[in-house]
Amino acid sequence: MSLAVNPWMAAGAVFALTALFFPLGAGEIPLNWLDFPGLAILVLGFAAACAWLARGWVAGLPLGLLLVGAVALGGAVALYLLYETGVGGEARLGFWLFIFALWATAWRGLDAIAGFRSLNKSAQRGVDLLVPLIFGCWLVFLWEVVTVGFGVPQVLLPSPSMIAVRLAGSLDILAADFYQTFVKAVISGYLIGCGSGFAVSILVDRVPFLKRGLLPLGNFVSALPIVGIAPIMVMWFGFDWQSKAAVVVIMTFFPMLVNTVSGLNAAGALERDLMQSYGARYWQTLLMLRLPAAMPFIFNALKINSTLALIGAIVAEFFGTPIVGMGFRISTEVGRMNVDMVWAEIVMAALAGSAFYGAMALCERAVTFWHPSYRQRR
C-alpha cells in the first residue's frame, strides 16, 4: 500500500528530523538528544502519528488531540533547552526549525479539533472552549520562546514568565489598583452612564423633537477625545475616582442612547399595527413589544460600553489620581522602566474587561434566547 504524500506529512518529517538533530545547532553546549528521555518519546510518538495520518487510521478529534499532545511535549523540550542548557539568547537555526515544525504541527492539530462536530451539546461545547484555550496557550508559548530565545531586553518586551512572577509577587498592589479603578470608577460610571442613556432614550422616543436635537449632539460628544475630556473632569470633580467615573459616564451614555433609540424602532410594522388594533397604549406597546425587540440593540451597547468604560477610566487616571489605580500604576512604572509591572497591570485589566464583557454576553444570551442568532439545532 503506497503512502499518500501531503504537506502535513512533510511538516511531520521536518518535525521528526529537527527533533532528532536540533540540539546540535541549538547553543554552545553540545547536547545528545538521549540525555533528555522525553525527546525520544516525542520523536517516536510523532512518527507514529504521521504514520496513522498517512494510512487514514486516525482522523478528526483523536488526530487533533494526538498532535496537540505531541506539540505540548515538544514545547516542554524547547523550554527545557532554553532554561537548563544556556540556549536562551543564543538559539541557533536548528532550534528555530524545531519551533517552526511545532507550529506546523499545532496548526494541523487545531484544524482537526476545530472541525469536530457533534450532536452532543456538552461535547461540542467542550471542544469549542478547547480550541481558543489551546490557541491562547500556543501564543503565550511563542511569546516566551521568542523573547527568551532571542534575548529580548526586558524594557522592550518581558517574557510571560517574568510577567507572571511579577503578578504573583504584587497581588496586594494589583488588588488595590483593581478596586480603585474597576470597582469604584468603572462600575459606578458604567451603571450611571448606561442607566441614564436608557432613560433618556425612552424620553427621546416619547418626545419626537428631542430625537432631532439630542442624537446629533450625541454624535458630536462621542467624537470628543478622552485626553481632552479627562483633564476637565479632573478639574471639576477632583483627583479621586469621581472624576474617572464622570469620564466613564460620558463615554457610555451616548452609545446606549443611540443603540436603544435604534432598537425601539426595530419592531415590525405588522406587530405594531396588531398592538394598535388591540387598543394598546404607548406604555403597553413599549413594554410588551418594542423593548423586547430592542434587547439585542441594548445588549450590544452594554457590551461595547463594558470595554469603553475600562479604557476611559484607565486613561483618565493618567491626568490626576491618588497614588493608586491601574492608570496611575502604568504611568509611574513606565517612568521607572519596570515594564514587567506595566504588563502585569495590562494583564489584570484585560482579564477584568474580558470577564465584564463575558458577563454581559451571558446576560444577553439568557434574555434574548429567542433571537435567530442563538437558535440551535435540537
Image: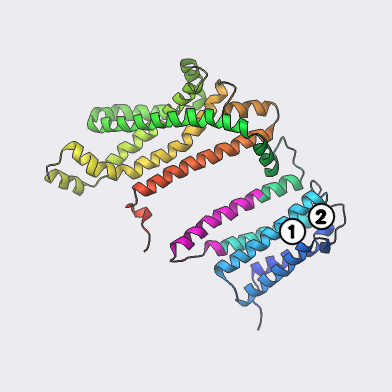
Q: Specify the segment rendered in magenta.
A: 112-140
* Residue drawn at (55%, 41%) of the image: 351
Disc 2: which residue: 26
* Residue drawn at (51%, 65%) of the image: 116
The amino acid sitting under disc 2 is Ala
Q: Is residue 312 above or below residue 239?
A: below
* Residue drawn at (49%, 15%) of the image: 235
Q: Secondary structure at mark 2?
A: helix
- Position of residue 160 measured from the top left corner of the image (x, y, whole percent): 67, 43
Q: Is residue 272 left or right of residue 146?
A: left
Q: Secondary structure at mark 1?
A: helix
Q: Is residue 8 above or below residue 238?
A: below
> Residue 107 versus residue 225: which sits nearer the camera?
107
Query: Taken as a whole, is the magenta stretch helix, strand or loop?
Result: helix
Q: Which mark is residue 98?
A: 1
The amino acid sitting under disc 1 is Phe
Q: Is residue 373 left or right of residue 137?
A: left
- Position of residue 186 measured from the top left corner of the image (x, y, whole percent): 47, 31
Q: Quadrant of residue 11?
A: bottom right
Between the residue at mark 1 and the residue at mark 2, the CA separation in whole angstroms equals 10 Å
Image quadrant holding the C terminus, namely: bottom left
Q: Is residue 272 above or below residue 97?
A: above
The single residue placed furthest to the bottom in the displayed view is 1
> Which of the marked residues, 1 or 2, is nearer the chain's N terminus?
2
Q: Is residue 16 visible?
A: no
Q: Is residue 285 left or right of residue 43?
A: left
- Position of residue 63 measured from the top left corner of the image (x, y, whole percent): 60, 68
Q: Residues within 10 Å of mark 1 (few under 14, many from 20)?
A: many
Q: Is residue 34 above or below residue 360?
A: below
Q: Are marks 1 and 2 in contact (CB under 8 Å)?
A: yes
